[in-house]
Image (cartoon, helix red, strand yellow):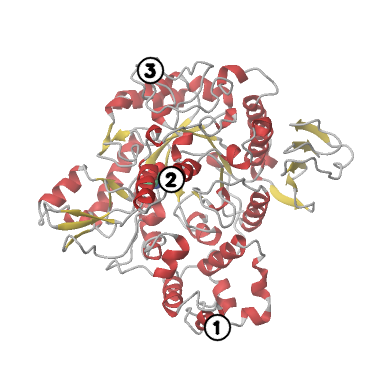
């Protein structure tokens, strides 16, 4: 294939669209405004030069923006493999993953904090649900400024969670049951209490000095204009050393410098150490952020205003990202059975393909987040999520991801409120919405990731005051809004819409909780008295049994795992797709709205396997139906 011409200000919009990052940007903008990106095919639009965008945008985009865009595209020379690639079968494609948030799953010693022994005691529940692999959020030693995503010692377990022996017992318990363990690998940053950072700060000649981004300077002038994801500037002043330190997240999470060869070698060592303990894979926290533009230049203000994060273009897909990922794969988890799942905020479909393509030697899957909010919305907006967005998003990705690429499928995790509540907070629709989302997760092509409580249809919490919240992101945002004069009730409403604490509350095992005999570390009332494991187990109409049935069906159906996805034409409020492999075929029909909807009957001879409503005639609000066609 001829080398694509480099993108310059004189390049045309159609060349931009032929570039993976350019295409992601255009697709995402089109998606945001609810338009098809195919307008790029219009010869007039396609022929526009990038340099003309400021004039055509009526001043909304400036020359500096075009330069930043061109610079970004120039930094991505790779293209996804356009040729067909064979479908590679793998355990992680067939598996159902379940994310455990250690603080809140099961407490075994009554201190109100979940722990490893508690998790061990619940493995039979997970096995019974049909879970194949457990993804454990961080259990490492940490001051817990960001709930363990600020690691003080990568080779030690936090005392409240237990010991390394407990972890070994958990690994053995999982393996005995034919299940696997995926650990969180948090190496974009470490805690400011990590020994590396303490030494780097204390001694300018320390070998650890270049493990971080430390810059000498003046207390009033941060080295650049980058903003932190958790409010305020991305720089913290350390008066004792007269230096600034870079932190893209909380001021206690110091960014590691992946430009340092020694730092990378230490990370590789540490990962190998965990592999030797029997860990089966890793979920790599914000892994696309690890490579930063050398020199850490200022971020473009327009990009900052558009995304909310000034500086983003200098690290969301840095110049050495692929090189670093390949090194990790080759040196730390070269075994094809070791799964590597990248958490990759701000990465679109095409750039994702550059990380997960079978020809790339980097990651197996990524978590992308575009489907979690409706166009133009952010997590901190209170609104009703329109499921038509989900249909458009997955239709696009499923069509685009051929046999050489694999997707993750998820809705809930520890960083987001409950999807069920976002779609429809009315309790009379909870069960139907939860079943619809589960149907999507277990019948599309990709690996499903459940988050604890999702299998029960858990909802957001009725927090009543800010002081009930624990999450650093929420508390920083509240402080920032208050400082700019936002009235307290508005501050609370905004934080409540998006707080990560909604999903961080303890798991509800029975009507009285069943999580701890002590006082739970995080309170919250999400209707646990009704929405709990004990009340749903054995009840055929429950959300929990719906999950069990879907998981069991998927396990026995190669078409639901590996089959192609064929979207059928339907009204916009109905989503119909088939999954087919060889002679095995299924039809899924979903009502995306809160009113009954008409849809064509299935082909003659179809066998109805599951229906969350009556299964015949018009679809009830949010009804999901699944047929076997052959
Ligand atoms: C993503 C994690 O999921 C989130 O909980 C954390 O705050 C950030 N990365 C920073 O580690």
Q: Quadrant of the N terminus?
A: bottom right
Q: Is residue 217 above or below residue 626?
A: below
User: Which of 406 and 366 lies nearest the eye of the viewer?
Assistant: 366
Asked if disc 3 is less than 8 Å from ligand 1, the answer is no
What numbered label is drawn on residue 243?
none
Q: Quadrant of the C terminus?
A: top right
How far apart are labels 2 and 3 at the CA level? 36 Å
| Mark whose residue sits in front, 2 or 1 | 2
- The residue where tag 3 is placed is 108
Residue at screen point 41% across, 18% down = 516
Quarter of the rendering containing residue 304 = bottom left
Res. 597 in view: yes
Residue 176 in the figure: left or right of residue 613: left
Q: Secondary structure at mark 3?
A: loop
Residue 248 in the figure: left or right of residue 30: left
Query: Which x, y percent locates residue 6?
Result: 47, 79
How far apart are labels 1 and 3 at the CA level? 63 Å
Query: Which x, y percent locates residue 530?
Result: 59, 21
- The residue where tag 2 is placed is 491
- Marks 2 and 1, the one that precedes in the sequence: 1
What numbered label is drawn on residue 49?
1
Q: Secondary structure at mark 1?
A: loop
User: Where in the image, quadrant-wise, is ligand 1 located?
Assistant: top left
Quarter of the rendering containing residue 209 = bottom left
Residue at screen point 66% across, 54% down = 392
Res. 326 in view: no
How far apart are labels 2 and 1 at the CA level? 43 Å
């Amino acid at each position: 294939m001829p080398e694509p011409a480099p993108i310059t200000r004189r390049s045309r919009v159609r060349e931009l669209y032929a570039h993976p990052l350019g295409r992601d940007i255009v697709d995402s903008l089109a998606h945001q405004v609810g338009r098809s990106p195919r307008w790029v095919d219009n010869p007039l639009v396609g022929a526009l030069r990038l340099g003309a965008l400021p004039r055509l945008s009526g001043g909304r985009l400036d020359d500096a923006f075009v330069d930043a865009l061109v610079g970004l595209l120039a930094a991505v020379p790779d293209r996804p493999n356009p040729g067909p690639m064979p479908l590679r079968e793998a355990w992680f494609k067939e598996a159902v993953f379940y994310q455990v948030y250690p603080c809140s799953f099961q407490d075994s010693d009554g201190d109100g904090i979940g722990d490893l022994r508690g998790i061990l005691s619940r493995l039979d529940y997970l096995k019974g649900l049909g879970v194949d692999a457990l993804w454990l959020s961080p259990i490492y030693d940490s001051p817990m400024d960001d709930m363990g995503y600020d690691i003080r010692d990568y080779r030690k377990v936090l005392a409240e969670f237990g010991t390394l022996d407990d972890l070994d017992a958990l690994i053995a318990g999982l393996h005995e049951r034919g299940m696997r363990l995926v650990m969180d690998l948090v190496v974009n940053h470490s805690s400011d209490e990590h020994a590396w950072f303490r030494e780097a700060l204390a001694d300018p000649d320390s070998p650890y000095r270049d493990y971080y981004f430390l810059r000498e300077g003046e207390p009033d002038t941060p080295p650049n204009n980058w903003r932190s994801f958790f409010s305020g500037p991305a720089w913290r002043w350390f008066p004792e050393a007269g230096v600034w330190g870079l932190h893209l997240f909380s001021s206690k999470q110091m960014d590691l410098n992946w430009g340092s060869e020694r730092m990378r070698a230490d990370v590789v060592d540490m990962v190998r150490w965990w592999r030797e303990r029997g860990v089966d894979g890793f979920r790599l926290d914000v892994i696309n952020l690890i490579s930063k533009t050398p020199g850490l230049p200022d971020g473009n203000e327009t990009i900052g205003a558009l995304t909310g994060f000034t500086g983003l273009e200098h690290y969301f897909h840095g110049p050495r990202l692929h090189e670093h990922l390949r090194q990790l794969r080759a040196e730390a988890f070269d075994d094809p059975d070791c799964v590597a799942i990248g958490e990759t905020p701000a990465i679109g479909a095409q750039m994702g393909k550059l990380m997960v393509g079978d020809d790339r030697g980097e990651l197996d899957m990524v978590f992308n987040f575009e489907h979690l909010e409706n166009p133009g919305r952010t997590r901190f907006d209170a609104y009703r999520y329109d499921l038509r967005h989900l249909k458009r998003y997955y239709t696009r990705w499923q069509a685009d991801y051929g046999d050489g690429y694999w997707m993750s499928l998820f809705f809930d995790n520890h960083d987001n409120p409950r999807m069920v509540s976002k779609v429809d907070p009315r309790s009379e629709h909870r069960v139907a919405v939860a079943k619809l989302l589960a149907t999507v997760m277990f019948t599309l092509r990709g690996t499903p990731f459940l988050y604890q409580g999702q299998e029960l249809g858990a909802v957001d919490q009725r927090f009543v005051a800010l002081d009930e919240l624990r999450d650093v992101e929420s508390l920083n945002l509240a402080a920032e809004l208050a400082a700019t004069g936002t009235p307290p009730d508005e501050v609370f409403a905004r934080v409540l819409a998006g707080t990560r604490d909604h999903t961080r509350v303890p798991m509800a095992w029975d009507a009285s909780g069943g999580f701890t005999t002590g006082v739970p570390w995080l309170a919250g009332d999400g209707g646990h008295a009704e929405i709990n494991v004990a009340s749903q187990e054995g009840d055929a109409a429950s959300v929990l049994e719906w999950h069990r049935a879907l998981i069991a069906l998927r396990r026995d159906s190669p078409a639901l795992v590996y089959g192609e996805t064929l979207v059928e034409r339907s009204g916009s409020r109905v989503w119909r797709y088939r999954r087919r492999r060889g002679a095995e075929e299924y039809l899924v029909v979903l009502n995306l709205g809160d009113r009954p909807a008409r849809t064509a009957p299935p082909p003659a001879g179809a066998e109805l396997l599951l229906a969350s409503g009556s299964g015949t005639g018009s679809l009830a609000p949010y009804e999901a139906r699944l047929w076997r066609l052959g």
